[in-house]
Image: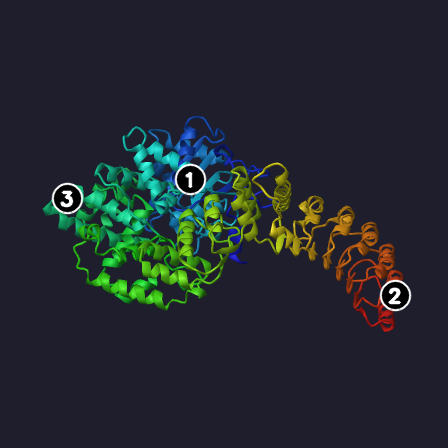
Amino acid sequence: RNSAKAMEKELVTCNLQEKEKIAISRSQIFQIPRHKGLETKVIVMLGKAGMGKSILVQKICQDWSNGEFSEFEFVFWFDCKQISLPYKQYSLKELLLEFFVKPQEGSNEIFEYILQNPAKVLLVFDGFKGFHDHENFPRCSASQPGNDLCSIKELLSGLIQKKILNGCTLLFTARPKDKVNQYVSRVDKTIEIVGFSPQQRELYISKYLEGLPCCDSALKLIKEREYLFSHCYSPVMCRFLCFLCETVLEMGEESLPLTLTEVFLKFFQQKIIPMQTDVTTTQDQESLATLARVAWCLGEKHQSAVKSDLLPSKEVKEFALKYRFFLPFAFPRHLDSEEEEFGSMFSDFVIQNFLCALHLLLAEELRDKSVTKYLSFPSKKKKPYDWLDLVPRFLAGLLFLQDDPYFRSLSNRDGIQPVKKQKKLLKYIRRLQINNLCPERLLELLCCIYETQSKYLLQHVALRLKPDLSFLDISLTPPDVHVLHSILKRSKKEFSLDLRNSGIDMQGLKDLVSLKNVASFRVSLSDTVRLWKSLEQAKDYELLKETAEKFVLHPFKAKTMKDISDLCDLVEIQEKMVNCAQDASDCTSYEIPAIRNLRKLEFALGPTCGPQGLLKLVKILAAFPSLQHLDLDALSENGIGDEGAKSLSEVFPNLTSLETLNLSQNKITDVGAENLAAALPSLSSLKILSLYNNSICDFGAENLAKALPAMTSLRVLDVQYNKITGVGAQQLTNSLRKCPHIKSLLMWNPTIPHGVLEYLQQLDSRISV
């Protein structure tokens, strides 16, 4: 089983028939149609770090306390960073009634009620990434999980395997890259949280700074830095930038840094420097270096929390808590007589990532040669430090900021090591075969180089990009798009972009495809339609025409009803563009080249949506004058049947360029074959016709035989695996004598006696057995 493909199937909330993303409200999160009510529900909420998964979980808890989600009498929320420490063990009762909340009385009665009414219990495990290590997910071995002590992994294993609290609802939050299906074999519902739109970013910034005299100035300041504003799609980044912007304006400065690395360098400096004295400066620098080492050691284990007594020193703990780089928490006690234990966790994933990069830069034991291995650009597989996904960008940025006064204020080390590491990075990138990088690594390289703001490196990669850039199925965030746009602009080459299924936002798509050196692009049809409709509403007909000329559709494969609907919308837009000259003086009649030049169309909607989808498709087929190949054969079998065959045959006269028609495996009977045969001669360019594996009998074969002489362009006919007998085969053979233009007739059928088929082949060698 391909786990990567299995994971992709679980990434979004889907319509089960069409596998389409649909937007849902908060109140719909726990609604699962057709679910067996007595079994445990498993819901996975995915979102990149900083997207607000934890905030949403807190909001769910708050809504429940205010009377919403009344199906639950108990809601328990756990931060996986706190409960997943490898040396901690719990019983289920301790986890529920000690760690989360401790009732003043009646603990035994409450726990017993929970065990008897699991359907009224919601368990939320926030930050499922905390379970990544080299062990397999264990099976629950406790004989009495409610009372026996076991690791959090074993408890979760029991919950997922329905050995514990069968019938409860489990909600996991995780990052999209975390292989949740490795641990959770069946997911009932998957939700993905996306970031802020440009309008929501502005609203957040305005609300954050509401009432302050600098509110309008701050919004303007952030929007001036387009790269930083693009990072505001992430709520966490947006909050950081609001804090920094407020501080910058209070200090009388008039601009923000250019890169994310500079932003966090300034953030740390603003946190620490105002509180320093000459005496504490050196101590803080040493504590920061030690804290950076702790961040790295934990990050390598996919952890962000630690028992407080395991920290290197009391000074480091107090330093981290003082500046809120750490947040404290308490562990539950197995016995009241036990001494209470405390832990500390990094207050934010970005802070931990930045400290990890700082450690890699400053650590004297890390040679300059070893720095490049943490960037991992050439790897086509998973990066070794994938969990610390911002570290390479921060590391590259810091290597080019060693002379920055903010950087020097945070470190008491000399600049020799960073200089050597910077030279090693430059040499490494110069030797890198950029054209051989897979799309993920290329994107990571571009983002890292952008953080350096090195004109040499930016120009170096811009000149070495290959003309055909595919980001098919690669997630493109607003910052990714900004970086790509910035680097493409530097190149004199012409580029072809494939942006399908990249999740690119509308503004980013508009920016990329409007570049003069982007000669062509492919993008999901729904995104194309939305782009053109927005340009049409804005009456930006010039850009609409420009992007229409660049858009590529060939070849097109329709896999869902939405694909068909989007294709219909595309044709509708063209009709408007053709007719708009009659309605507006600033618009000229125009055809979309992608529609005019589409030569191959595959239809693979499956048996559920296939018949309905074809009825919609045939209404627009005439809009594709260059269509040469129409393929209705799919592994899942479309099953268009006789009705589909009839509706398709009605548009044959319009398909003058069609050369290949594949109607294999579509449940077509004699009725459908009769309708097809009557219309097939109107396909003046048809060379290959496949009716393989249908239900055509002798009557259908007879009608096809009558049509063959009139199909003068036909070269190959395939009627294998139907229900044709020797009678129908003889009629086809007789007709074949009148068709010197046909080169091959494939008609092996289990209902034709082998001797008859051999005899017919002797009569005409063009018959294939």
SS under mark 1: helix
SS under mark 3: loop
- Residue situated in front as seen by the camera: 291 or 367: 367
Residue at the far top in the pictured view: 67
Q: Residue at the location (51% across, 46% down)?
A: 543
Dots 3 and 1: beta carbons under 8 Å? no
Q: Earlier in the sequence, mark 3 or mark 1?
A: 1
Q: Quadrant location of the C terminus?
A: bottom right
Please give left or right for residue 664 compared with residue 312 in the image: right
- Quickly name the residue at label 1: 198
Please give left or right for residue 240 compared with residue 490 in the image: left
- Quickly name the residue at label 2: 738
Amino acid type at circle 3 is: Gln
Is any atom of residue 671 visible in this view? yes
- Residue 620 disc label: none
- Residue situated in front as seen by the camera: 683 or 662: 683
Is any atom of residue 102 visible in this view? no
Residue 358 coordinates in the image, percent (x, y): 26, 54
Residue 276 coordinates in the image, percent (x, y): 14, 44
Q: Earlier in the sequence, mark 2 or mark 1?
A: 1
SS under mark 2: loop
Q: Earlier in the sequence, mark 2 or mark 3?
A: 3
Crowd tier of the residue under label 2, counting other residues whose Cα lies within 10 Å: few below 14, some 14–19, many 20 or above: few
For the residues labelled 2 and 3, the Cα–Cα distance comes to: 99 Å
- Quickly name the residue at label 3: 276
Q: Quadrant location of the N terminus?
A: bottom right
Amino acid type at circle 2 is: Lys
Which is closer to the viewer, label 3 or label 1?
1
Residue 507 coordinates in the image, percent (x, y): 46, 44
Whether 768 is drawn above or below 535: the answer is below
Q: Residue at the location (25% across, 49% down)?
A: 265
